[in-house]
Image: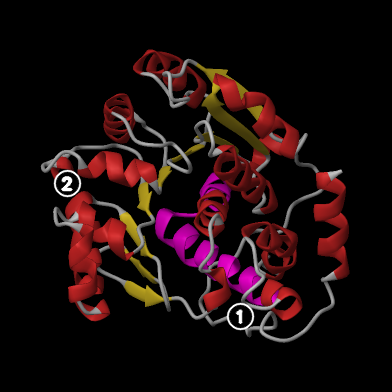
Amino acid sequence: MLWFLLFSEGTFMADRSGNSCHQIPEGLPKLPVRIRESSKFDYGRVVLVAGSRGMAGAAALSSMAALRGGAGLVEAIVPESIQSTVAGFDPCVMTHGLPEDAAGRFSLSALSAIHDRCQKADVVALGPGLGRSDDLVKIVQDLWQTLPRPAVVDADALWALAQDAEWQKFEHTGARVLTPHAGELVRLLGSSPSREKKQERKELEAAASHLARATKSVVVFKGPASLITDGTTNIHNETGNPGMATAGTGDVLTGVLAALLAQRLSAFDAARLGTWIHGAAGDEAVDRYGECSLTARDLLRCLYTQTTRCLSK
């Protein structure tokens, strides 16, 4: 029933106008038009390492967003107690449950199996709804350093990285995209999130650019006019609205970014295009629901129209 609602309401909104009709900026990366002789394997396999007891929705939102972003296959690796819950959101998402601790978070004994599942991935998304524990610190820091594939790192995975004061020196091979909001960025820089309020946005943006350069990553610093930076090139996103300041919208962004990476965009191009699509979907959703009533699920209903607009001609 949920899948039907997502599809039918999204279809209803396809012809709406308003904020959703942004002019596509010159130079915005595009997705290639799909050729007739193609299969799901041509559009990438996204594996999400996400979720914990009480946070199944974060894993589900990211997974469904990855599908809407065009990934050919999406698998959600989750703690075993929430596997059936995540699977129930969308029959198109594959799920795999792994060992957990008493609080319903991944236990360290899951790490070997996580590696096994990630071997099949083109892109890994790490963080939505993971929770926080000593085991998760070890899992996240191991994956950051050892995954040869591109990875999108968000939410509690950012917290886990920041638990080691030397994390910026960790080596990695695959491309990395970090998606912090201001509090998470300050923590990644080694300060208390309470300092966020004392720093100007411009100062934090400079720090985000430095972080990208230091970690050889792309950073999407979320907020008004989100900054996309690889440490050399800095671009501000023009889409989005205050209605998107609600739980789950960051999980949706993670899924979209992973999907675009899986379709072989570079990390910077995927970050730039994905952030634009995510914000444009939010603007389309706000036309119908208003800023106060917008939810992350509403973005899913609008992703396909904005993604389709960004196909190369």
Q: Is the magenta stretch mostly helix, strand or loop?
A: helix
Image point (69%, 79%), residue name: 20
| Amino acid residing under circle 2 | Gln
Image point (86%, 64%), residue name: 11
Would you say residue 266 sits in the magenta stretch? yes
Is 277 drawn above or below residue 235 in the view shown? above
Asked if residue 217 lies left or right of residue 27, the reply is left
Asked if residue 220 lies left or right of residue 37, the reply is left
| Amino acid residing under circle 1 | Ile
List the residue tagged with mark 2. Answer: 168
Q: Quadrant of the N terminus?
A: top right
Note whether residue 298 is visible.
yes
Q: Give the range drawn in magenta.
A: 258-284
Q: In which quarter of the image is the C terminus?
A: bottom right
List the residue tagged with mark 1. Answer: 24
- Using the rendered view, name the quadrant where residue 157 is placed: top left
Image point (65%, 58%), residue name: 32
Whole-percent x and y of residue 131? 40, 37
Q: Which of marks 2 and 1 is nearer the N terminus?
A: 1
